[in-house]
Amino acid sequence: QSALTQPPSASGSPGQSVTISCTGTSSDVGDYNYVSWYQHHPGKAPKLMIYEVSKRPSGVPDRFSGSKSGNTASLTVSGLQAEDEADYYCNSGTNNWVFGGGTKLTVL
Amino acid sequence: QVQLVESGGGVVQPGGSLRLSCAGSGFPFSAYGMHWVRQAPGKGLEWVALISNDGNNKFYVDSVKGRFTISRDNSKNTLFLQLSSLRAEDTALYYCATQGFCSSVACYAHHFDQWGQGTRVTVSS
């Protein structure tokens, strides 16, 4: 049950866009459209941001979007805001429910 | 309003046991599968276990198989995680989460929809 691969860090200035990648294999990310993304501020409950690759729950700003190409899923945050600074995790949504290692997003 | 409240964490010696609880409210608890997810200090999120809505199907990450047991009491809207033979590497903040959600037209079961605030488990001598 190998973790999905995410870059450890990402950054951008307010108003800019940033994309975080999540690479798996043909057995998880590549074969199913179940990737989800979570925002986690330390000490708080994780929050669902994207499910099934690109679906956005109600209440999540449309600045957050998801996509997938082959074995790699991506989360894009447009129009960066200070409150977007957090850790972001992807998850495969398949039988082993593997998370990525997490990406710390810094708003400069 | 969906609410998940974990409890039962604490400090326990290696080899010891602990029972975590997660009380759900504001949604039809018995209709949803439930997860446990943990975060060790300085580490990322790790899925631990999943139980089906009726309690008949249970799944675990390899590292806890044979040591942890997930269960639920739908009459009390409560999820449990029995931790046994605890190791230092089990030290973590343990979260419960709902398995997806159902709208009026479809169910989406491949993500963690609502999360609790977590309960902390420390394994130390």
Image (spheres, coloured by chain):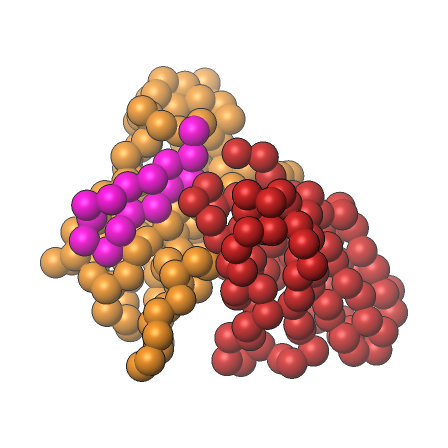
Chain colours: A red, B orange
Q: Position of residue A78 (x, y in %)?
A: 76, 75
Q: Position of residue B115 (x, y in %)?
A: 43, 60
Classify residue B117 as left or right of residue A80: left
**Residue at 78% over, 78% down:** A79
In the rendered image, which quarter is residue A106 located in?
bottom right
**Residue at 58% over, 64% down:** A53
Residue B40 lies, with reference to residue A54, above or below; the image says above
Q: As rendered, which of B29 and B104 lies closer to the eye?
A: B104
Residue A96 lies, with reference to residue B98, above or below; the image says above
**Residue at 49% over, 37% down:** B92
**Residue at 73% over, 70% down:** A77
Q: Which residues are magenta?
A: B48-62
In the rendered image, which quarter is residue B25 located in?
bottom left
Q: As rendered, which of A4 and A28 lies closer to the eye?
A: A28
Q: As rendered, which of B27 and A28 lies closer to the eye?
A: A28
Residue A62 lies, with reference to residue A106, above or below; the image says below
Please indicate, yes or no, whether residue A87 appears anywhere in the rendered image: no
Q: Position of residue B44 (x, y in %)?
A: 60, 43
Q: Is residue A16 magenta?
A: no
Q: Position of residue A14 (x, y in %)?
A: 84, 74
Residue B123 lies, with reference to residue B103, above or below; the image says above
In the rendered image, which quarter is residue A20 located in?
bottom right
Classify residue A98 as left or right of residue A106: left
Q: As rendered, which of B110 and B11 lies closer to the eye?
A: B110
Label count reads 0
Please indicate, yes or no, whether residue A81 appears anywhere in the rendered image: yes
Q: Quadrant of the C terminus of chain A?
A: bottom right
